[in-house]
Amino acid sequence: MSDMALLIWARGTGFQLALGIFLLGMVLRAFEIFSLGRKPDLSEARESTPGSGWRTVWSRSIPHASTWQRTPATIVLGYVFHLGFFITLALFIPHIQIARSTLGISWPGLPTPLVDATALISIVALIGVIVHRLRDPVRRFLSVFEDYFTVALTLLPLLTGYLAFHHQLLPYTLMLAVHILSVELLLVFMPFTKLAHFATLFAARWYSGDLAAHKGVAS
Amino acid sequence: MSASFERGYNVLKEMIDAPIASYLSSCVRCGMCASACLFFTETGNPKYTPIHKIEPLRKVWRREYTLIGKLASWLGLAKPLTNEDLANWQELLYDSCTLCGRCSMVCPVGNDIAYMVRKSREGMAISGHAPAGVVAATQRTIEIGSPMGVRLPAVKVQIKHLEQETGLEVPLDKEGAEYMVLLSSMEIINFPEYLSAIARIFHQAGKSWTICSEAFEATNSGIQIGVGDLAREILMRIVDGAEKLKVRTVISPECGHAFTALRWDGPNLIGRPYAFKVQHILEVLDELRIAGKLKTEGFEEARLTYHDPCQIARRGGVVEQPRNLLKMVAKDFVEMSDAGAMNWCCGGGGGVSANTDADEIRLKAFKRKKAQLDELGPVTLVTACANCRIVMEEGLEQYQMDVPVVGLTETIAAHLALSPQITPPLPNPLPLAGEGTIALSPSGRELAGEQPGEREKP
């Protein structure tokens, strides 16, 4: 298979397959969670409450001051790589062009050199995440194979995209194909690993906020 | 597979609901919950990371409720939960967790880890992996009526002393009273000043109240051990008593988990809403303050700070009321760092203080409270949970700290503006730092049958 044939497969059949698995997997995940239901809370809710499920969905993105002091590396690395990943994914003009050609929607992007720098920062932050996992006693203790595997899955699209953009390591066509395949790999594993948190955390935060709000406490 | 393990496994399976499935789907093992847990911060041992404590529950969830977990176990790639796992996790689920819920406040994906620990305990207890101390306390509550073995005659003795001391009547089994007052064993044995304060406050406010002879005990170790059936049985005494006496409001005493058991878990345990209202004593006092029925005079000379009991503040929503009340009597009120909803636990909640296996780690965990207090300098510590109070007194003694600990209700009662009709003897003012802790009244010591300086634990 030539580089071009691989690229065409990755852009066509490969992408459709990956997207299909991703969507079905996420539907399954949602079913696995919500089909369990929850019993109605018969205790009398407080009339006035500083919290709500929706409030916690947003408020939980901001760490408490004392958490900042105790785990700054986890917070900074986490924030930088998540933000960098989303900027690179959603505000890189060639990515927006794909959305325009496939979905017919588009939005303004950021100047390419800025996205280029952001991608590099995210790559460094993700490597930092791995180092932090290996060195910090709590993170090392908690980590299982899935933790390193999912960081690698997240790192690959950033790394291959960066190399393709700079025409490094492999011929451009092949590197672009590898880049798209790495995105597909990420999509395939997302629903079945902890990467599903990108969606399920909204349910988790909502439930937590709702439980706390019932008792009249912010969460 | 032993029968008890199988029962425990099935209970864990039943405990998993949509919130738990969303929590376990979302955990990225970032470890931030460790930084919120005093058992980790004061030992530095990663095994005390809160999310690690619910590993047995996670294993059950993955195997029973996820396609990928089912596949993994079918292919022999995932180790099933074993009875040995549960035995190993007893230390993590009971000795080193007070259900304080601080971890639940910091989890970036929003996991209520304390909720999952509470549910995990159901499976642990059924499979025979609950600590002996909490099992014994629960048995005493079922058989005798209180975790510390207190019976009605002991309460009556206290009432008699109180009536002689204050000249006020303590109404027993009075039908149609507005308030039904509950006590914790700790208050009956160690802190009789609570009931005396209640009698004087309600007299001043002109409110009718009563104690139910069949249901005076508020604590519910069924909740701490994690057995819903026992918790329900203990709770039903209060529900029956309150409904028989047709009281409007049942007052949860200065006890953290009693409030959780009665206010939040109760209706769910009995499967219906109550015919009465449940309030914590601090909520009642603050309502009286707002209505102008709680009048105080004079101020404390000591510098005061307030320890928020976890189940009352973070897990109970009573945060502002104690501050409003303290400001009535304190000229110099200072907050500890992280006060309010993010306060650090005393280290002895959730059954930990009743669990002798946890004695050593509880005292280590107290170093967090010590650090909070050290930042403030000389201070008197006010709280609203008799268990927090006794745990902190023990911790303060261990670290040779000179910090008096007092209850909030009695602090307010010590400053009641006297009504002309009665002239109860004024209680001693609060001790200043350097004067030691408030001494037990003779009646309290008599009841407890203890030597000076020695206090009971549930």
Image (cartoon, coloured by chain):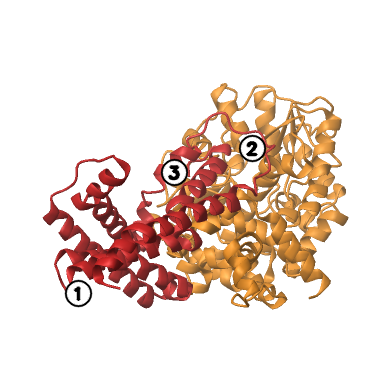
Residue B9 vs residue B454, the one in the foreground: B9
Secondary structure under the numbered disc 2 in the rendered image? helix
Q: CA distance from mark 2 to mark 1?
A: 72 Å
Residue located 65% across and 22% down the image: B420
Q: Residue at coordinates 69% horizontally, 63% vertically from top-left?
A: B354
Q: Is residue B456 above or below residue B426?
A: below
Disc 2 to disc 3: CB gap under 8 Å:
no
Callout 1–callout 3 Cβ contact below 8 Å: no
Give the percent coordinates (x, y) of residue B346: 55, 58
Above or below — where is B143 with respect to B127? above
Q: Chain of mark 3?
A: A
Chain A, which colour? red
Looking at the rendered structure, which numbered label has been put on residue B281? Answer: 2
Q: Amino acid at mark 1?
A: Leu
The dot on residue B19 is none
| Chain on which label 1 sits | A
Residue beneath label 3, please?
Answer: A57
